[in-house]
Structures are given as structure tokens and as C-alpha cells.
Amino acid sequence: MAARRHATLVFSRHGESEWNVANKFTGWVDVDLSEKGVGEAKTAGELVKEAGLKFDVCYSSYLKRAIKTCNLALEASDQLYVPTHKTWRLNERMYGGLTGLDKKE
């Protein structure tokens, strides 16, 4: 009988987006990362590297804020070789008529 291989599953949310800063419901609107969000993604990659985690694969939504977070984190952890797969199933929830509105409204 073959030995079982231990697996580690790592989840990460995208870095802060421009609409997070504006406090807007984003949903599937394809907004970019804020400057802070870029830094958060890089920091996530540095933490991955410090922890000695090595990825076999990376999954992301089709939204550029998630794709950029994935790419920046992989670059910061020296793992740009890792295959990435995108799926709409990882996109943020759809907010319908709330999309674009200030969350305070």
C-alpha cells in the first residue's frame, strides 16, 4: 500500500482593490488592486517564502485583482514556475443592483 502524502491547502484573498478603498460593492466588476493591495500581495508571497511553502498549483478567479495577487505572491516567493488555473467559480459573489454602490448606502 502506498504511503499517503500530506497536503497543505493555502487560501488567500486578493489584496485591497480600488473599490475596497472607495467602500463600494464590487462583485464581478473587474477593478484593479490599490497600491496597498499590491504591497499586500507581495507581503503574502514573502510570508509564503519564509514559511518554506512550495506550491504545486495555484487557482484564481478571472478577476484581475485576484490574478495580480496570485502573480505578485508567486513572484515574491520565487515560484513563478507554478502552473495557475483560472475559473469563474472563484469569482466574488454577484451583488446585482448593489454593485457599485457605497456600502454605507
Image (spheres, grey):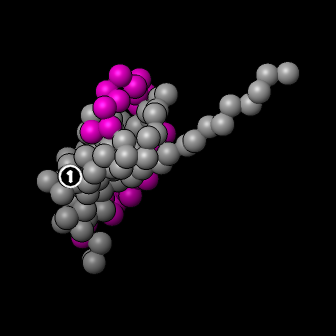
Q: Quadrant of the N terminus?
A: top right
Q: Quadrant of residue 105?
A: bottom left
Q: Position of residue 41 (x, y in %)?
A: 28, 48
Give the residue drawn at x 25%, y 62%: 20
Q: Position of residue 61 (x, y in %)?
A: 39, 39
Q: Is residue 98 left or right of residue 57?
A: left
Give the residue drawn at x 43%, y 28%: 85
Given the current orientation, which residue lies at the most extreme bottom position?
104
Give the residue drawn at x 29%, y 72%: 103
Q: Which residues are magenta?
A: 76-102
Given the current orientation, which residue lies at the most extreme left position?
35
* Residue position for label 1: 39
Report the amino acid beneath label 1: Gly
Q: Main secondary structure of the magenta part?
A: loop
Can residue 27 be seen by looking at this rendering? yes
Helix, strand or loop under label 1: helix
Q: Position of residue 15 (x, y in %)?
A: 29, 53
Between 67 and 31, which is closer to the camera in this rendering? 67
State whether residue 1 is above or below residue 97.
Answer: above
Residue 83 belongs to magenta span: yes
Given the current orientation, which residue lies at the most extreme right position?
1
